[in-house]
């Protein structure tokens, strides 16, 4: 086909994928399943477009994951995830290790595969997927600390799993000792951290002081800095994924020019990367080979979801408590166990041993493909039910509303949206009784589909949506006050309620 035909086909796929996102959003499914479906339809089992290079898929996949991780870091609020980082790091290190070992031991006994292949399969499946987590969980009103753990974990755990898969798939490491393996992994992670902590602050400092001739250059410059971090870490034999996530996290939480435009640009780039990545992986898969992978895939996936993931969460929580980094309640642990979504990352990681020529790696790829599809269909739509079942559903939480507004940036202000849930003691409270700090105000109320500017004596009702403008410095205090009144009413302070969690 000519270039014009390829461009037309690509544009058509992107438009169809964008249209399908709304369907996926309504059903609660991660959109990756729809994009994978497009790839399967275009591949050898569909329209017959050939794509059979695991080496090329690996290179494209890792680059796309870097873009997705960059967007995740740029759109993650450090103030929201700060308290969750210790537990997220436990899950990304101890949790990943426990998951690899449990899956490897189980599949070696149940499926009879050799030890090295079992470890590779465990490592491939150990990472939660940033794109799947961000697309599903950011729609759920979860407590800030729990949501922060899931988001930060999905950003941090890619690095150790990629390192583990690459080392286990390399022939030169087939007889390496555990000590050598841990040493190489630690060195790569340390280099990734160092590069991320160097590029992020330096880039933020430069962007605040360099006057670019066009506002559209700032988002490009920010994304380019994340890839400077990624490429630099890889050249130094470090973790590019850890470097790119840290750099993006630092840049996304710095006071940069045109932050809203930068976030919008990063989100668009990440969506394009997701579409291209999942369609490509769908084209790489061979539907005719999938039936033989269904039974071993279901066995492995069941072990992963019902045994390995819960054990990794419990081990991480226990170690976090021993080190006095905080304790995670059993309800949060239960939800964390069920919410460990897998997506494109395990499929991309499965191309690494395939490209390296590891024996049985094509069957491993097919198993991972089946696991991702089946268990995403199982877990994704049931997350709201699981949140209610385990008592972690918080419909009264304030959350961000994206605003492209220069005045808000100049005033260092945020726009918050709060929906009043059934049972909230905010019902019946007058606006002035909220006693918000001086830097915040309720500017609009949406009631029964109509919006109006409230007076100080306006009474809040269930199902109202409030729009609040607050300075960045008192935003945390505003959120705490709203949670406190929602739980204990306008006299929350008298009852010792501070809205801290």
Image: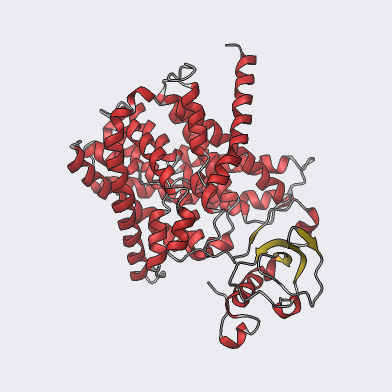
> Quadrant of the rendered structure where residue 329 is?
bottom left
Residue 201 visible at all? no
Look at the image and tell me in which quarter the N terminus lies: top right
Is 332 left or right of 481, judged from the image as shown?
left
- The image quadrant of residue 420 is bottom right
From this viewpoint, which residue is outermost toward the bottom? Answer: 494
476 to 26, vertically: above or below? below
Q: Is residue 420 above or below residue 405?
A: below
- Image location of residue 349, percent across then percent down: 39, 36
Across the whole image, how many numbered discs are drawn on residues?
0
Between 251 and 40, the residue placed more toward the observer is 40
Rendering colour mode? secondary structure
- Residue 293 appears in the rendering: yes
Q: Is residue 17 left or right of residue 49?
A: right
Q: Is residue 455 left or right of residue 263?
A: right
Name the residue: 45% across, 45% down.
129
- Residue 11's quadrant in the figure? top right
Horizontal and vertical percent position of residue 236: 45, 40
Question: Looking at the image, which residue sits at the far front?
Answer: 448
Residue 174 on image: x %, y %: 24, 36
Horizontal side of 60 relative to 184 (left or right) equals right
Tell me: residue 135, above or below residue 81: above
x 62%, y 39%: residue? 224
């Amino acid at each position: 086909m000519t270039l014009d035909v390829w461009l037309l086909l690509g544009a058509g796929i992107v438009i169809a994928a964008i249209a399908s996102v709304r369907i996926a959003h309504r059903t609660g499914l991660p959109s990756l399943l729809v994009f994978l479906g497009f790839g399967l339809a275009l591949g050898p089992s569909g329209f017959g477009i050939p794509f059979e290079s695991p080496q090329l898929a690996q290179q494209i996949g890792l680059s796309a994951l870097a873009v997705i991780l960059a967007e995740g870091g740029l759109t993650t609020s450090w103030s929201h995830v700060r308290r969750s980082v210790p537990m997220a790091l436990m899950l990304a290190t101890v949790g990943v290790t426990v998951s690899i070992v449990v899956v490897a031991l189980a599949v070696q006994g149940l499926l009879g595969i050799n030890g090295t292949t079992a470890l590779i399969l465990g490592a491939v499946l150990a990472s939660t997927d940033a794109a799947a987590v961000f697309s599903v969980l950011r729609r759920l009103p979860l407590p800030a600390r729990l949501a922060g753990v899931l988001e930060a974990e999905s950003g941090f755990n890619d690095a150790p799993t990629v390192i583990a898969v690459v080392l286990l798939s390399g022939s030169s490491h087939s007889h390496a000792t555990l000590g050598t393996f841990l040493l190489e992994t630690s060195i790569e992670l340390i280099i990734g951290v160092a590069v991320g902590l160097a590029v992020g602050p330096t880039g933020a400092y430069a962007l605040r002081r360099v006057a670019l001739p066009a506002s559209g250059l700032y988002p490009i410059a920010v994304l380019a800095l994340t890839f400077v971090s990624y490429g630099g870490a890889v050249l130094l034999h470090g973790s590019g994924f850890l470097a790119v996530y840290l750099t993006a996290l630092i840049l996304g939480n710095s006071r940069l020019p045109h932050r809203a435009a930068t976030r919008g640009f990063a989100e668009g780039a990440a969506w394009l990367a997701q579409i291209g990545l999942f369609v490509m992986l769908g084209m790489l898969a061979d539907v005719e080979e999938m039936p033989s992978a269904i039974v071993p895939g279901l066995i492995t996936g069941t072990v992963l979801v019902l045994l390995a993931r819960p054990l990794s969460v419990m081990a991480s929580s226990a170690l976090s408590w021993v080190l006095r980094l905080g304790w995670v309640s059993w309800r949060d642990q239960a939800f964390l166990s069920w919410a460990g979504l897998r997506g494109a990352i395990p499929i991309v990681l499965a191309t690494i041993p395939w490209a390296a020529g590891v024996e049985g790696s094509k069957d491993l790829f097919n198993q991972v493909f089946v696991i991702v599809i089946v268990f995403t269909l199982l877990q994704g739509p049931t997350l709201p039910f699981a949140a209610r079942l385990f008592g972690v559903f918080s419909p009264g939480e304030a959350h961000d509303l994206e605003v492209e507004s220069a005045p808000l940036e100049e005033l260092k202000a945020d726009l918050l949206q709060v929906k009043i849930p059934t049972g909230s003691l905010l019902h019946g409270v007058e606006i002035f009784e909220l006693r918000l700090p001086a830097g915040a105000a309720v500017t609009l109320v949406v009631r029964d589909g109509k919006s109006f500017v409230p007076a100080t004596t306006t009474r809040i009702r269930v199902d109202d949506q409030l729009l609040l403008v607050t300075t960045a410095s008192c935003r945390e205090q505003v959120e705490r006050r709203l949670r406190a009144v929602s739980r204990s009413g306008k006299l929350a302070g008298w009852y010792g309620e501070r809205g801290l969690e």
